[in-house]
Image: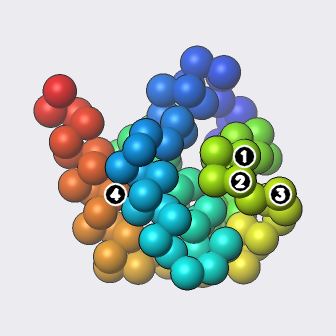
Amino acid sequence: MADPTPEELERLFFLDAAALEEARDKRRLHNRLGWAIQWGTVRMLGTFLTDSGPADVPQVVVEYVAEQLGIADASVVKLYGDRPSREAMKVATSSSAAENSR
């Protein structure tokens, strides 16, 4: 995956109030960050990262999302599992569908 442009970062990985709330509901930092990155990749690619996982997205994406969540050490994303949870898929898919219907 190539580095997204600043415009793509803003458009695809900016966490609105609902996404921030959903991410912050996750118990651990790596789950917050991993979920938020998955949310953005669904918007960007139309699918979840299953082979590589959030740890393999461009570092600029990880840092951009971590900053929004107030996570100082973005390397915690490496602890996030490769497979998205059913809840993460359900929420991100519904959020993406709502976004695309606007």
Q: Indicate the position of residue 84 as horizontal and vertical percent values.
A: 45, 74
Q: Indicate the position of residue 22 as horizontal and vertical percent values.
A: 41, 62
Residue wearing tag 2: 70
Residue 72: which disc?
A: 3
- The mark lying in front, picked from 3 and 4, is 3
Amino acid carrying mark 1 in the image: Glu
Marks 3 and 1: in contact by CB < 8 Å? Answer: no
Q: Residues within 10 Å of mark 2 (few under 14, many from 20)?
A: few
Image height check: is 52 above or below 3? below
Marks 2 and 1: in contact by CB < 8 Å? Answer: yes
**Sequence-wise, which precedes: disc 4 or disc 2?**
2
Marks 4 and 3: in contact by CB < 8 Å? Answer: no
Report the Cα–Cα distance between label 1 and label 3: 7 Å
Residue wearing tag 1: 67
Report the Cα–Cα distance between label 4 and label 2: 20 Å
Q: Residues within 10 Å of mark 4 (few under 14, many from 20)?
A: many
Amino acid carrying mark 3 in the image: Ala
Q: Is residue 56 visible?
A: yes
Which quarter of the rendered picture does the C terminus lie within? top left
Image height check: is 42 above or below 100? below
Report the Cα–Cα distance between label 3 and label 4: 24 Å
Marks 3 and 2: in contact by CB < 8 Å? Answer: yes
- Observer-nearest residue: 69 or 79? 69
Report the Cα–Cα distance between label 2 and label 3: 6 Å
Amino acid carrying mark 2 in the image: Gly
Residue wearing tag 4: 92
Q: Indicate the position of residue 93 as horizontal and vertical percent values.
A: 27, 56
Q: Indicate the position of residue 23 as horizontal and vertical percent values.
A: 49, 62
Q: Residues within 10 Å of mark 3 (few under 14, many from 20)?
A: few
Amino acid carrying mark 4 in the image: Ala
Determine the residue positioned at 46% across, 71% down.
25
Residue 83: which disc?
A: none
